[in-house]
Image (cartoon, rainbow, N blue to C red):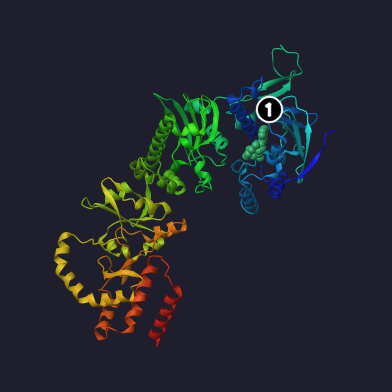
Amino acid sequence: MAEVENFEFQTEVKQLLDLMVHSLYSNKDIFLRELISNASDALDKLRFLGITDPGLLPEQELQIEIEPNEAARTLTLHDNGVGMTRSEVIENLGTIARSGTKEFLKSATGARKGEPAPELIGQFGVGFYSSFMVADRVTVVTRRAGEATATQWESSGDGRFEVQSVERASPGTSITLHLKPVDVEDGIEDYTQEWTIRPIVKKYSDFVSYPIRLRVDAKAAEQDASTDAASVLEPLNSRKAIWLRSEAEVLPQDYEEFYKHISHDWQPPLARIRAKLEGVFEAQALLFIPSKAPADLYHREMAHRGVQLYVKRVFIMDECSELLPLYLRFVRGVVDSEDLSLNVSREILQQNRQIHAIRRFLTKKILESLKAMKGERPEQYLKFWHEFGAVLKEGLLAFGEKKESIFEILLCESTHSASELASLDDVIERMPETQKTIYFMAGTSRSVMESSPHLEAFRAKGIEVLFFADHVDEVWLAQNPEYRGKSFQSVGRGAIDLASEEERTARAEETEKKTATYKDLLDRLQASLADEVKEVRLSSRLTDSAACLVTEEGDLPPHLAELMRQAGQSVPETKRILEVNVEHPLLQKLQVLYAKDPLDATLAEYAQLLHGLALLAEGGTPKNPASLSKRLSELMLKALA
Ligand code: ADP
């Protein structure tokens, strides 16, 4: 008798099982989809290993068999896939929680309290454990291809599982569910019946590329009596690769199921893209844009995600990141190439000409589809933009990418409207032909930027300013981009004077006079702020505020410098320029004070206050907030005295 070893489930797995046993999900049928998908993955893995080691492949066709037993009230799924070793079984089915489990538990417990429980199972890949929704005991017998011994795993979902060595005639995995009693009200159907199983498989797993066969009683099966076996296998799925069927032939819900199958996302996709590459290289692609960004869109691991690669209907690999540029990493789907070798490895893919050709083609197709969506279905496009716009803009940094096509579909906030996003084409349509520059502000949020003094002159002149608030914006904007012959200019950088040539000439004399009049005051303020700014100068961009801070052309914008520091880069401090509005009563008063006594200490105090307030106005943080606040309260006291 083989020795039975006992194990505890890992804490998170335990919690998960508890949720499954007392299942929240009304749709319990999906356990079958999850088990079939695992079996199909195991067959994919074996087929892939078989390319280099054909000895591992079974003589029998690769397949999934479903065997119901009405009398024993069990349902068994057999696959002749890659199987698991003893240690793999222990790890995979109990001691190591899958990476999404924690997140799953969080959302599932959240859902329990309030709204109806969403169907989250697929998204978080808790697949196997869903068997405990319909079974009170599960037995797995598995043998790894290339190994002689098999392992049996068994659990009642109560916190423990048992493992022992057993015999299995050939490699593969059999999972037996000891079914709970039928309870239609609770969503538990009779899973020993063909009429229950067949529609579930059809609905969820029709496109699985391996035959899924149901073992049925030979007497019950309608057949030509050519066999005297007690049971026969009946095919359940059509196996037609959905990406090869004509669009007219495929129902929208079939596409949706397929998307859910490959993406582990439980929500329907936002859009579908079919693409066929013809010519020197041939490939077919069926791509989807998800309706929600995954939580890890900006994590490093996400960077490796990508679409699935098939070669002539043979699954080669998941997450083939070489097929799409990084900024399109949110796209899911399948690419089936006619010409690649089945032996392709990741290393080969990186320099493969066909892969490069497919990637260029897919990139073009996706950007074209997005452009069409923007034009034809603006509401849908807006949803897309909110989820993935910031990632798409990473393409503006990439070398050699078609930036023009990204600019065409870029949306951003703008002073033109408080509620609607603007596209660059709209902005260019709206501006006078003579305007050569698209003005923008980059910062943390629109509301902060909107109250910036930098906008005053633009408001006064009715010139549109765009707001950019994503991290990536500062970076692409710093590369001096151009679109349709227009350059981008930050309203907070360099000397901005919106006056026309004539206005400037007319004003020249006055400006000269002003400069002469206020020169001494400005010098005095600058001397008091020697540690903070490199210059105090007259402003031509302010109308209402007393002062604002400006970054000199060529210097790093402060927001970008901050981001770089957060990313661990050492960025030298650069001083900025304090621009003052001498029309403002505050400056007028300071001028009077200066005239009375150029050495008056109040001037230095006010210089500090002006600088601190200019920083606050742009959403910045003064170096020493406590001293600024102290100065302000002293000032308030004086005013009340
Ligand atoms: P997921 O399928 O999301 O990885 P599961 O909990 O369903 O999560 O499965 C855990 C792991 O167990 C799988 O990743 C796989 O390695 C292994 N596994 C499950 N079913 C099978 C099977 N039929 N054959 C081989 N390995 C399997």
Decide if residue 273 is on the left or right side of residue 407: right
Q: Nearer the viewer, residue 596 or 87?
A: 87
Q: Is residue 95 visible?
A: yes
The x and y percentages for residue 423 are 34, 48
The three-letter code of the residue at mark 1 reads Gly
Kindly indicate the quadrant of the structure image that contains residue 140: top right
Residue identified by numbered label 1: 146
Residue 570 drawn above or below residue 48 = below
Residue 558 drawn above or below residue 347 = below
Q: Nearer the viewer, residue 343 or 382?
A: 343
Specify few, some or many for label 1: CA neighbours under 10 Å numbering under 14, 14-19, or 20 or more: some
Residue 197 drawn above or below residue 371 = above
Residue extending farthest bottom: 641
Q: Quadrant of the N terminus?
A: top right
Q: Quadrant of the C terminus?
A: bottom left
The x and y percentages for residue 596 are 25, 86
Decide if residue 491 is on the left or right side of residue 302: left
Q: Is ligand 1 within 8 Å of the beta carbon of the residue shown at mark 1?
A: no
Residue extending farthest right: 1
